[in-house]
Amino acid sequence: MRILLLLTLLTFSLMAKIDIAVSYPYIGALVEAVGQDRVNVSVLAKGNWDPHFVVPRPSLISKVRNADALIINGAQLEIGWVPPLIKRAGNRKLSQGAFLDLSTKIRLIDGAHDVSRSGGDVHPDGNPHFHLDPHNIPLLASAIASFLSKLDAEGKGYYDSNLQTFDIAWKKDLEKWDEQMADAKGREVVQYHTVFNYFLQAYGIDSIGTIEPLPGVAPSSRHSMHLIDMMKKEKPCCILHDVYHPTKTAEFIAKKSGIRLVIVPHDIGALNDIESLEALFTYLVEAATDD
Amino acid sequence: MNKILLPTVMLAVLATADTELDDLNIQMTKMQQQIDILNNTQEAKTTTPPSNNSTTSSLPVEESTEHSFDHYADSFKQSSFMPDISLIVDMSYVNRNKKDEELQHLEVPGIAHSLIGSHSHGDTGHATYNANNGFNLNYAELAMQSSVDQLFDLNAVFHFTEYSVEIEEAYLTTNSLPSGFRVRGGKFLSEFGRHNNQHHHVWSFTDAPLVYHAFLGDHGINEKGVQFQWLAPTSNYLMFGVELLQGENESMYGTSAIVASGDEEVQAASSPSQPNLIVAYAKASIDIEDTTILGGISYATGESRIDHLSDEEGPHAFSAESSLYGVDLSLKHYFDSYRYLTWQSEWLYRDMDGDKSTYATAANDSFNTTALEKKQAGYYAQLVYAHDRNWKVGLRYDDIYKNEINAVDNEDDLKRYSIMAEYLPSEFSRIRLQYNLNKALYDEAGARQDIRSLILQVNLAIGAHAAHSF
């Protein structure tokens, strides 16, 4: 009888997947790569939304409530929408260790020493868009593997071997991208918001300006005119523009300055054909090297 | 030199720390990467990697300044436990077609005394938002929140008006009950309906919906008590809540005995059993593509003790058993990250069944009591369009359409029309222009007085303020 019970429990535990809620699609892809058959992933934000301004809809509360664990990007990127979800969901697991903040595993750049909101809607801990440096991806995958192993000790070997497979494939891609990007070093670009800084810094590309005058503040005509003058002088290669801000101002600046405007994805799902992390970086590399 | 020094220091620090092996691996990769970055940025094409096995090397000694010593104050600093503190200030400029003193005598007949303007009850004077013509300082609200320990979060909102302060909210919330349960206790805004637990600074208009304001007063159901909520383990949002509240709401409930002025012995009604108010609700939400629908039904029941015995004109009191029913429906459709359209509507119905007491003699030492039953209902509907993160426009329609007193229809054509446009320079500031046409107010002679108000409101937030829920 006892054996029967144990067997049932064992089969049940073998079948039961752990439910992982993640804030953004890129985290979902990493959890799926490492967790594969042992996890169910639910992604809270859509890839084509502004990651700063996700609406904390009630359906997301249910996802957080029903999850076994929550993984967030951190560095205050979710400050405007995840706290009310956690507060409302009342998921005890999250306060007992089933919570991972990826930003704690990464060295953040652009850290502000002097934080004031007169400088716009700044992130005091540093730039939170660190997943856009492809060299950070293995760090994140490894952090996720350790986290999953902590939640589900039985699966440690499984996660480790998945991680290894992922790392090998990623390393191959990374070498290819590093090689392609070698020529882009020293180039200059303009962005809408400093969302692509990690990618640019990784490859020695200078971000010489942003279309928004201050973080989170809408473009002003004075700033745009100033930017156009500067771009005419500096001749950056292109304007890298995210998918979620209106492109009207950027189109105007591109026309006036004669600098090419490129819409680039920041996450999986930002554009229709960006269905994986590889596709995301392949697109970014092509955009940055295309002439 | 720096290039070698930095990784060496970091490795040495790491070696002394009691880190898990996995974390160490991450750190190692991270460092390798930092080294790469350093190499890249300095354009140094050296092929020899910095040595990785320097774990035995000693930490470089900090250059000691002449008089460097530890101070005990630094050892016992607690600033990292600072709660999130924010200050919200709301001010307005108001222009109405009636003078302040005329407004104070207007009422929603059979439903609410002076709706706009200042009024006093007990020892405290109250002003509604935007009470006076000209400049108004509506409030300065100090909000604090933090987790207390592994069990509780604590929130408090101090509502400062120009000459007084109220503890608008001070409550604990459990953060680790199992199975989707949550308990809240203290003083808080009830989650009856949709509007009631929203703070003023997230309202889409500068004043409360007419039916809320008329039935429940300036602050809605804002009571001491305890709240139990359960979030169902369903894939769609489904939540049930019950609240046991003191029930002191001055417009609809109340806990004080009704006694003749100057004589404690002469009672029209004794105080009800306390706590006096029970609130229950169920809320559900679904997403259809980029549209979110949220709906709820709510119920509140308790005893009324409404004391107007000290009024100069027609002193009276009302004690009753009172129930309030609510149905709410909200829709939000997103066009993109910033552009959306929201619809919010609520219907309220109340049934107050009891006795009206008036003084029987000029000496105010005995009461005449007559049966009084009020059945009243109204609703509001508002539509707000956010064009981008900086601009919003909105329309609101208020209607109290049922006003039955002792089975006789009273004035029940009580409407208000509102339109607003707001500019948000950032997440933290809001400038709103609102126009109201209020057709729900009557003077003492029973004649309707249309009130036109133009309100320019400025709302500012500083500090660490928690994000708002849906």
Image: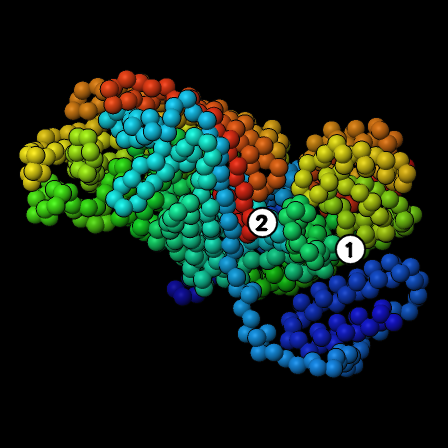
Instruction: Give the quarter of the figure containing the C terminus of chain A.
Output: top right
Within-10-Å neighbours for mark 2: few <14, some 14–19, many 20+: some
Q: Residue B120, located in which quarter of the rendered image?
A: top left
Within-10-Å neighbours for mark 1: few <14, some 14–19, many 20+: many
Q: CA distance from mark 1 to mark 2?
A: 25 Å
- In the rendered view, does B282 fall on the left or right side of A125? left
- In the rendered view, does B271 fall on the left or right side of B242? left
Q: Please give the name of the residue rendered at 10% of the width and 35% of the height, measured from the top-left corner.
A: B359
- Residue B367 x %, y %: 8, 36
Q: Which residue is mark 1?
A: A135
Q: Is label 1 on the same chain as label 2?
A: yes
Label 1 element class: helix
Q: Amino acid at mark 2?
A: Ile
Examine the rendering and report whether any part of residue B230 can be seen.
no
Asked if the residue under mark 2 is in contact with the one under mark 1, i.e. CB atoms within 8 Å, the reply is no
- Residue A243 x %, y %: 71, 36
Q: How is the image coloured?
A: rainbow
Instruction: Please give the chain letter of the residue carrying mark 2.
Output: A
Q: Please give the name of the residue rendered at 23% of the width and 49% of the height, measured from the top-left corner.
A: B275
Q: Nearer the viewer, mark 1 or mark 2?
A: 2
Q: Amino acid at mark 1?
A: His
Q: Which residue is mark 2?
A: A79
The tag earlier along the polypeptide, 1 or 2, is 2
